[in-house]
Image (cartoon, helix red, strand yellow):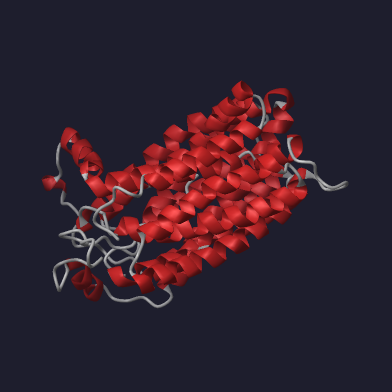
């Protein structure tokens, strides 16, 4: 599962200086590339749809359908089984995203990977809805994770070299609305179909496939001039070294660490929300956990949408990224204490709103920040694939971490505290970044 993360074009050449926040060269390759590529009307709107569909699948399956299916198959061991499946599928999610990004760079095309990944995911979700054992659920979910990350890697690479650095906060905010919009739609679909899992999986798969068809039909695939000829391709060892070279960059490495910790803290709790509501929170009479999620998710996503837009616009206007990212990550850590102090329905409503505000602002502005520290423009999709490990990996590892915390430390109170601590440390990881204000 990977959070919505639009790949904007990196700033080639020198990193932005702390004093100016813009590249030192007056006419950067980034701007040249932007003007060289034909502009396509509705590109950001189509990317918003594509990212919304991505998050609808991830949130609908991860928050409702998969936990419900596992609780039906293994009611006495649901926490451990969900954690195990999440941990194993992490290998597929974290591996396929950067690999697919590198292959997309090499081929010079995006659309075949977008459409192929979405259609393969639809098949994987159909399989997931038809299996009845924990082993087959794990296998099917791994297949879905792999194919959805092929889709995501190509989608995040559609806009490199087209959006100037000064507008990345605004563009990131618009496309970043895919998380609140898609998350809300996905959870509502999943909540309504929780009693008919096969239908729920098929509907969500169709949402992803439909979005891919729209994007690939109306967004013409412009061949990238930087694709690598077969004869010029490096050896396998050199490719691995180049693949990981972005992590040698100081600012990119710290952005990676901060993103990974923040996402891990957030999804460690959100991924277990169904079980939290079932086993930890005192719900009003007659309110079931799936119905409660259908209420909490729009609350959280509305707050997320607000902070995504406001944070992105203000970070552009003030030419500041780090303060928005650091403060929002710290807030996300602090609000984890609310369900600990008040394990009630009211407490969960307050927590969902505040957590949505914090996470939305973080993801919008952090996306703009990381596009300014990508080392090389020509390796945009590959390096964003590496960065997306900080998105996909923690989201899938989170159930494994949460399972270990809940079973070993005794309940969901430690889970909220651990999630809060991870987010706070993620806020501190932003401080060493030097190339962006």
Q: Horizontal and vertical percent for residue 296?
A: 69, 54
Name the residue furthest right. 285
Q: As displayed, is residue 153 above or below residue 422?
A: below
In the rendered structure, the answer to whether residue 431 lies left or right of residue 416 reads left
Name the residue furthest top. 408
In the rendered structure, the answer to whether residue 400 lies left or right of residue 199 reads left
Q: Residue at x 33, y 62 (%)?
A: 8
Q: Residue at x 60, y 62 (%)?
A: 303
Position of the C terminus, as image quadrant, is bottom left
Is residue 266 visible to us here?
A: yes
Q: Residue at x 79, y 41 (%)?
A: 282
Please name whichever residue, 435 or 175, is drawn nearer the observer in this view of the structure.
435
In the rendered structure, the answer to whether residue 324 lies left or right of residue 25 reads right
Please name whichever residue, 137 or 122, is drawn nearer the observer in this view of the structure.
137
Is residue 53 visible to us here?
A: no
Q: Residue at x 40, y 39 (%)?
A: 94
Quarter of the image for residue 63 reads: top right
Q: Horizontal and vertical percent for residue 208?
A: 54, 56
Name the residue furthest left. 232
Q: Horizontal and vertical percent for residue 134?
A: 63, 27
Q: Horizontal and vertical percent for residue 372?
A: 28, 59
Please name whichever residue, 402 or 221, is drawn nearer the observer in this view of the structure.
402
Q: As displayed, is residue 315 above or below residue 61?
A: below
The total number of labels drawn is 0
């Amino acid at each position: 599962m990977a959070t919505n993360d639009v790949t904007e074009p990196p700033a080639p050449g020198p990193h932005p200086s702390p004093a100016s926040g813009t590249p030192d060269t007056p006419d950067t390759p980034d701007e040249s590339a932007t003007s060289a590529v034909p502009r396509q009307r509705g590109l950001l709107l189509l990317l918003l749809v594509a990212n919304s569909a991505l998050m609808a699948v991830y949130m609908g399956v991860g928050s409702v359908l998969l936990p419900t299916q596992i609780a039906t198959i293994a009611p006495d061991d649901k926490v451990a089984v969900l954690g195990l499946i999440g941990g194993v599928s992490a290998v597929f999610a974290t591996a396929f995203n950067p690999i697919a990004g590198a292959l997309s760079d090499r081929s010079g095309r995006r659309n075949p990977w977008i459409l192929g990944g979405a259609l393969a995911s639809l098949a994987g979700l159909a399989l997931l809805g038809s299996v009845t054992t924990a082993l087959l659920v794990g296998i099917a979910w791994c297949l879905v994770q792999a194919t959805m990350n092929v889709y995501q890697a190509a989608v995040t690479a559609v806009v490199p070299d087209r959006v100037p650095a000064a507008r990345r906060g605004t563009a990131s905010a618009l496309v970043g609305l895919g998380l609140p919009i898609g998350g809300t739609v996905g959870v509502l679909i999943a909540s309504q179909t929780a009693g008919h899992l096969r239908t729920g999986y098929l509907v969500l798969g169709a949402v992803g496939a439909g979005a891919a068809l729209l994007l690939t039909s109306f967004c013409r695939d412009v061949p990238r001039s930087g694709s690598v000829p077969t004869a010029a391709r490096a050896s396998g060892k050199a490719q691995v070294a180049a693949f990981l070279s972005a992590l040698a960059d100081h600012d990119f490495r710290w952005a990676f660490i901060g993103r990974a910790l923040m996402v891990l803290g957030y999804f460690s709790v959100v991924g277990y929300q169904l079980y939290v509501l079932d086993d930890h929170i005192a719900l009003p009479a007659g309110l079931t956990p799936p119905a409660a999620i259908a209420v909490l998710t729009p609350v959280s996503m509305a707050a997320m949408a607000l902070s995504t837009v406001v944070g992105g616009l203000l970070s552009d206007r003030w030419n500041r990224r780090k303060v928005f990212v650091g403060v929002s990550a710290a807030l996300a850590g602090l609000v984890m204490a609310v369900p600990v102090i008040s394990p009630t329905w009211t407490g969960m409503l307050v927590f969902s709103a505040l957590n949505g505000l914090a996470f939305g602002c973080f993801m919008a502005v952090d996306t703009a920040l990381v596009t300014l520290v990508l080392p090389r423009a020509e390796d945009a999709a590959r390096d964003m694939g590496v960065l997306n490990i900080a998105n996909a990996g923690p989201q899938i590892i989170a159930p494994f971490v949460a399972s270990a915390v809940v079973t070993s430390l005794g309940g969901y109170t430690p889970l909220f505290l651990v999630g809060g601590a991870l987010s706070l440390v993620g806020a501190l990881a932003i401080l060493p970044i030097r190339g962006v204000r």
